[in-house]
Image (tube, helix red, strand yellow):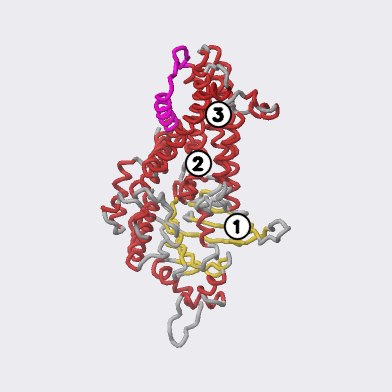
Amino acid sequence: MTIPALELKEVRKTFLKKKQKGRLSRAKREEVVALEKVNLAVQRREIFGVLGPNGSGKSTLIRLVSTLLLPDSGTIEVFGHDVEKEEFVVKRLINRVSVDAAFFKKFSPMENLTYAARLYGMPIREAREKMRQIMLRLGLKESTFTQPMENMSRGMQQKVAVARGFLTSPTLLLLDEPTTGLDPQSKRDVQAFVREIREDHDATVLLTTHDMEEANRLCDRIAIIDEGKIIALDTAGGLKNLVSKRNGQEPTLEDVFIELTGTRMEEKERDE
Amino acid sequence: MSAIMREMRSAYAFVERNINLIKRYWGWEIVWLIYSLVNSLAVTYIGAGMERISGQALDTQYLITYLLVGTLIWSYLSVIFYAISEMIAWERWEGTIEYTFMAPVSRPTHLVGTTLFAIGYGVVRTLVILVIVASFFHLDLSGANIPGAVLLLLAGSVSFVGLGILAAVLPLLYPERGAQMTNAAAALLLLISGVYYPVETLPAWLQMIAKASPATYVIEGMRGCLLHGARTVTLLPTVFLLFSAGIAVITVGLIVFRFMERYAKRTGRLKRSG
């Protein structure tokens, strides 16, 4: 039997959130369920999408796989390695691109990527050539490589974030809303690169997004997550088949989301 | 071999990152250096002015050297303390903490890199201050035991590395106020360690706490070396004490850090940038 690239079994994660305190009373804490008994398996070379509104548990899921959070219960395995018990093995197999391009803002892309390469123990000469190639492939101009990140646009910073994520050749790449806030051209560049990573480098991709179109275009299979629970999991076509045609029109993933949750994704996000 | 190379490269990441931070924030560096320099001068001039203040004949030269040793050693030890305790705070300020914690770097490797930088930076910075401050006063160190002083300082650095790790836990747990809490810890060490006055000047209960501060032994030993030319052999018990206490504090620091890192991962505290 083939070992899945990623497997979550009965994963539960809660956080304690401070409630507003009164003048004389101490702040009380209430439990917020971020993920509730999540089960899923992502196969090798798959681009697997997790689609849901803000606050649905997508980023928590990515952080758990990234070893940045520990689950309350359940197990998470990356290529058969438990993220808690074999943390360092897992860390060598993964990398992550998040929605916020977090960098040392006064450093240049090359300095930031050199820091990342050294952290992963990469030989620096080889790493520098790889950085150049990835950044050029993503459409960044060579003149920007040595400019401070704080002078770059959000789109350019996000491309450097993608370059950092792929620099270490992860076999499982975790993309947490990597195209949010990007202009259409930057979005297309990043999406094309994600496809290329899978085709040319045998990588598996876990992609969270709230962009229906992106999920439809990129993902082999999509899980719809809402309030910490996976409420549907199939190919884009399979998910659309859950919903009957309206006025003779093919349903969209948005229709599927409304059908399954009873509300539009934007409304869910407004309620958060 | 390749595993050792990989760890060395990872450790060097923190050295290079900190050097780059100094280059990028050079304005802050200059301000901070001027502050330390002026502070050292101001404290040392208290010694120079004591005869006038008290109206009595005093050994001014001794007082000047006494205060200068305190201020310079404190400058060095506090740099070690801050450089290590800020290993997390910088990542919080820049928002990169999740990426550093996601990388396959063990905390001892993280510490080795940060310590190498801290000691190098501390030595260079203290030498710059020493050269400038020395030009204001006539210092006679002809009878001083310099090798003994260096030995003592190295042993004291080990303890301050351990204290730095313990202080680094604060920004890990408290994203908004952790860095300020490390300032309070440093201020307490300054008060009790006899930096500017003999520990015996303090109330009895503070003298008890002073015994737990490695800086107390480093500064006392350094004064012995530089003011009285204490022989190296007489320093060995203190060097041994400082070194073993340092190893113990580093071990405890790493255990506490590991425990708190897991706590931060359970409660989601790595996420907020502060």
Q: Chain of mark 3?
A: B
**Around disc 1, counting alpha carbons within 10 Å, would you say few (fewer than 14), some (14 to 19), or many (20 or more)?**
many
Disc 3 marks which residue? B159
Q: Amino acid at mark 2?
A: Glu
Q: Amino acid at mark 3?
A: Ser
Q: Taking the image as drawn, is residue A162 in sight?
A: yes
**Do residues under tags 2 and 3 come within 8 Å of each other at their CB atoms?**
no
Disc 2 marks which residue? B86
Q: Foreground mark, 1 or 3?
A: 3
Of residue A17 and residue A37, the one placed in the foreground of this image is A17
Q: Taking the image as drawn, is residue B154 in sight?
A: no
The magenta-colored residue range is: B121-147
Relative to A253, does residue A150 appear above or below in the rendering? above
Kind of element beneath mark 2: helix
Of residue A4 and residue B38, the one placed in the foreground of this image is B38
**Do residues under tags 1 and 3 come within 8 Å of each other at their CB atoms?**
no
Please identify the quadrant where the C terminus of chain A is shown. Answer: bottom right
The label shown at residue A13 is 1
Q: Chain of mark 1?
A: A
B34 falls in the magenta region:
no
Kind of element beneath mark 3: helix
